[in-house]
Image: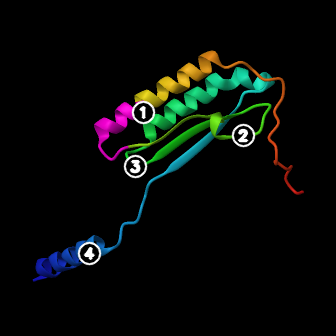
Amino acid sequence: MKHVYSLMIVAGFFLVLGCTKGGDRSTGVYMLLDTSGTYAAELNHAQSIINFLLGTLQPGDSLAVGRIDTGSFSEKDIIAKVRFDQRPSVANNQKRSFQKKIDAFVNRVNASSHTDISGGHPAGR
């Protein structure tokens, strides 16, 4: 009889667990790369972080990478963006394509003389 009660408790647990609403568990990451002055020399480190993210993000997650330089940030400063497909094989192809875009950007970017983000204010003002 003890085993029957144990099975009923376990079955009840899974019934309750199965009835809970699962909400969207996707992750979104937006990474900004500063391409001004000496920061441009650090792009290889940023590239390593992006590669790590590509390895850890799951289907349904989103990743975008943009650059900031001497001008106001706009849509043209987005290097790559993607929401990974739910199908793992398609998501893997999207990750490879994303990585190629980042590699091409890092290999061709020229450092700007300074950073200027119009509309940005120092903290506390």
Residue 7 lies left or right of residue 94; in this view the side is left
Cα distance in 3D space between marks 3 and 1: 12 Å
Residue occupying the point 35% across, 71% down: 21
Locate the N terminus by quadrant.
Answer: bottom left
* Location of mark 4 (residue): 13
For badge 3, the amino acid type reads Gly
- Determine contact: label 4, label 3, CB under 8 Å: no
- Determine contact: label 4, label 2, CB under 8 Å: no
Which numbered disc covers residue 60?
A: 3
Q: Secondary structure at mark 2?
A: loop
Above or below 23: residue 122: above
For badge 4, the amino acid type reads Phe
Cα distance in 3D space between marks 1 and 2: 25 Å
94 in magenta: yes
Q: Nearer the viewer, mark 4 or mark 2?
A: 2
Sequence-earlier tag: 2 or 3: 3
Task: Kindly give the residue lying farthest to the top in the view shown.
Answer: 107
Above or below 109: residue 62: below
Q: Nearer the viewer, mark 1 or mark 2?
A: 2
Q: Quadrant of residue 102?
A: top right
The residue lying toward the viewer, choosing from 15 and 113, is: 113
Sequence-earlier tag: 3 or 1: 3
Sequence-earlier tag: 4 or 2: 4
* Location of mark 2 (residue): 73
Residue occupying the point 18% across, 77% down: 6
Residue occupying the point 75% across, 26% down: 39
Cα distance in 3D space between marks 4 and 3: 28 Å
Which numbered disc covers residue 95?
A: 1
Q: Specify the segment rendered in magenta.
A: 85-95
Secondary structure mostly taken by the magenta-highlighted segment of the chain: helix
- Determine contact: label 3, label 1, CB under 8 Å: no
